[in-house]
Image: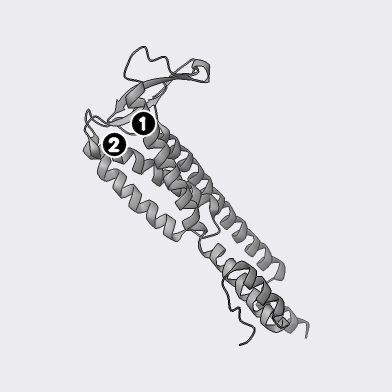
Amino acid sequence: MRWLPTSFSVISLLDDLARMDPAGCSAIFRHLKFSIKSGFEVRPKISIFAFTFPAIIALDFVTKRWALAELTRPDHGHELLGGLVPLTLAFNKGAAFGIRVTEDSRWFFVPVTILALVLLAVLYKEASKKDILRISAISLVVSGALGNLYDRVRWDRGVVDFLGPVDLGFWDFPIFNVADMAITCGAALLAISFWLEDRNERQMAAAKESDSAGRGDPRDSESDGGVRQ
């Protein structure tokens, strides 16, 4: 095994590679290529979630903390997009965008959220590692749900909202937060993912039927041959 590298430094490694025989060098590069390819194929699900989850959680936490510190005064003067999106501190005891079931629905939404997270975990586990859309969608919904769940559990004031209300001319869009946006975007992407899956399955089924019809039934061919004889 004289061709194996004897040093872990970059310069020594390059020097060892230069002195290797072609067969040994080829074996190492094949091993490296396989390792890199295998790691890329096995870990996309983990990589997407590992990037999405901390980003959404951190952004949601920081913006809520900022809102609690800066938006308590009525004349705070903060707004977004030239006033198109006003910033108003509110505490939501209902679902996303202020949807309520009862006056204090805190302990209704906590178990419902936990159940939803369990179902999403099952979907995440069953998702193909190549289904980037579904993995991204689940990661967004889980991140947003946990962001709002933290508010529900830590106190009885409700979820901290601060973006809005947005005047749409015919309706004031409810006040929301970063977690709500993650949940909404993730839910929309998840719906698209299911629709694409259903469309692909229908197309595959139609293709199989078309292929079967084109080949015909072998029993019919045998029957026709017997008649001609």
Q: Amino acid at mark 2?
A: Asp
Quarter of the rendering containing residue 69 = top left
Cα distance between the residues tagged 1 and 2: 10 Å
Q: Residue furthest right?
A: 228
Where is residue 17 shown, x and y percent of the image?
68, 75
Of the residues under marks 1 and 2, which one precedes in the sequence? 1
Q: Residue furthest bottom?
A: 1
Please tell me whether mark 1 or mark 2 is closer to you in this view: 1
Q: Between 4 and 185, which is closer to the camera in this rendering?
A: 4
Q: Between 192 and 81, which is closer to the camera in this rendering?
A: 81
Q: Residue at x 35, y 40 (%)?
A: 147
The residue wearing badge 2 is 151
* Residue 179 shows in this picture: no
Q: Is residue 127 left or right of residue 196?
A: left
Where is residue 52 shown, x and y percent of the image?
47, 47
Q: Is residue 116 above or below residue 152?
A: below
Q: Between 37 and 120, which is closer to the camera in this rendering?
A: 37
Q: Quadrant of the C terminus?
A: bottom right
- Secondary element under disc 2, as helix, strand or loop, is helix
Count how many numbered circles sit on residues in the image.
2
Where is residue 35 shown, x and y percent of the image?
57, 70
Query: Callout 2: few (<14), some (14-19), or many (20+) C-alpha neighbours within 10 Å?
Result: many
Q: Residue at x 32, y 24 (%)?
A: 90
Q: Quadrant of the N terminus?
A: bottom right
Where is residue 89 shown, x and y percent of the image?
34, 22
The residue wearing badge 1 is 64
Q: Is residue 217 left or right of residue 193?
A: right
Q: Is residue 197 above or below residue 220?
A: above
